[in-house]
Image (cartoon, rainbow, N blue to C red):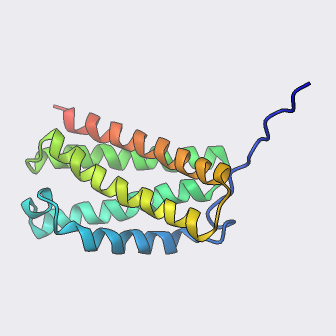
Amino acid sequence: MLPRPRQVRRQSLSALGEPPDRIAAEFRRRVRVDMATQDWYSRFDEDSLRWFRERGVRMSELLLGGLDTTRAVGREQLIVQAETLGREYGVEAKRRGLSLGEATQAFLFFRARFMAEIANVARRRALASEQASLQFEEADRALDRVILALIAGHQTP
C-alpha cells in the first residue's frame, strides 16, 4: 500500500549542461592555485611533475567521462582505465621516494578538488538533492577504486 520510492535516473554531465572539458579546466585551475602549498609537491623535479601532470590530466578526463556517460558498460571501461593510471601513480610515487602516506596525501589533495568541482556543478545547475547525491556517490565510488589501485601499485615489490 505504500508508494514505491521514486527511482532517480542519473543524468550525464553534458545533459546537465556541464561539458566535461569545462569541469576539467576549472579543476586544473583550482589545482594549480593550491598545489604550491603542498609539502610533497616540492619534492619533485620538473620531469617528475610532468609525468604526474600528464597522467593526472588523463585520469581526470577518464573520471569525468565516466560521470558523463549513462551507459554502465562505458562507465566501467573508463573507470578501469583510471584505476590503471592510479596503479601507475602508486608505482611511480614509490619509485620517486614518496611513502605510501605521502602518495595517499597527494591523491586526497586532488580528490578534494575534484569533488569540489562536482559540488560546483550541483550548485550551478541547482540539482535536486537526489540528482546531486547520485553524482557525488558515483564520483566517490570511482575515486575509491582509483585510490585502492594507487595503494596496490605502491605496495608492489
Residue 118 percent location from the top left of the image: 50, 60
What is the quadrant of residue 152 in the picture? top left
Return the residue found at the far front: 2
Residue 53 percent location from the top left of the image: 27, 65
State the residue in front, 104 or 84. Answer: 104
In the image, residue 18 sits, relative to residue 3, either above or below, namely below
Image quadrant in which the C terminus is located: top left
What is the quadrant of residue 4 in the picture? top right
Residue 28 percent location from the top left of the image: 36, 71
Is residue 16 toward the left or the right of residue 54 in the image? right
Residue located at (36% from left, 53% from top):
111
Is residue 143 toward the left or the right of residue 97 in the image? right
What is the quadrant of residue 144 in the picture? top left
Q: Please tell me how many numbered marks the rendered image carries.
A: 0
State the residue in front, 62 or 9. Answer: 9
State the residue in front, 84 or 134. Answer: 134
Residue located at (17% from left, 48% from top):
93
Residue located at (9% from left, 66% from top):
45
**Residue 89 in view here:** yes
Return the residue found at the far top: 1
Image quadrant in which the N terminus is located: top right
State the residue in front, 1 or 106. Answer: 1
**Residue 70 in view here:** no
